[in-house]
Structures are given as structure tokens and as C-alpha cells.
Image: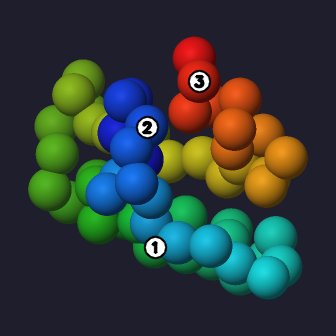
Amino acid sequence: MDTILSPENLIGAFLTETEAQDCAKKQEKILEQTQDESLRDRVWIASPENIFHLETE
């Protein structure tokens, strides 16, 4: 996910944390191959109750 949260930067919504973790790991590998480390986007998992908080910061 990019530093600026917006819907087009979300990589998915998942039913389980395991599914989310698997997807996050895949996305991190893609970013490692396509972006320099110093400028690399960060990937994190946000629970549904925290999404509103992230969008309003």
C-alpha cells in the first residue's frame, strides 16, 4: 500500500488474517523486484475497524 491511502492502493479484502498475510507477502516480493529499497512502498494489514481511522488521518 502506498503511504497515501486511497481505494486504488488497496490490494484486497480478505476473510481471514492468513489470507491477508499471504497476499501481503506476495505483494512485498513484487515490490522488492520493482522498487528501490529507499523508495519502496510499504505493505501492511489493517483490520476492518481500523480502515476508517486510516482513511481520515
Tell me what residue is drawn at x 43 percent, y 37 percent.
5
Q: CA distance from mark 3 to mark 2?
A: 9 Å
Tag in front: 3 or 1: 3
| Residue designated by label 3 | 56
- Number of marks in picture: 3
| Residue designated by label 2 | 5
| Residue designated by label 1 | 26
Amino acid, disc 2: Leu
Task: Residue 9 in the image: state x and y as whole percent.
Answer: 35, 53
Q: CA distance from mark 3 to mark 1?
A: 27 Å
Residue placed furthest toward the top: 57
Identify the secondary structure beneath mark 2.
Answer: loop
Identify the secondary structure beneath mark 3.
Answer: helix
Image vertical order of residue 51 relative to residue 29, above or below: above
Q: Residue 19: which quarter of the image?
A: bottom right
Q: Mark 2 or 1 closer to N-term?
A: 2
Identify the secondary structure beneath mark 1.
Answer: helix
Q: Mark 3 or 2 closer to N-term?
A: 2
Label 1 near label 3: C-beta < 8 Å? no
Tell me what residue is drawn at x 79 percent, y 82 percent.
15
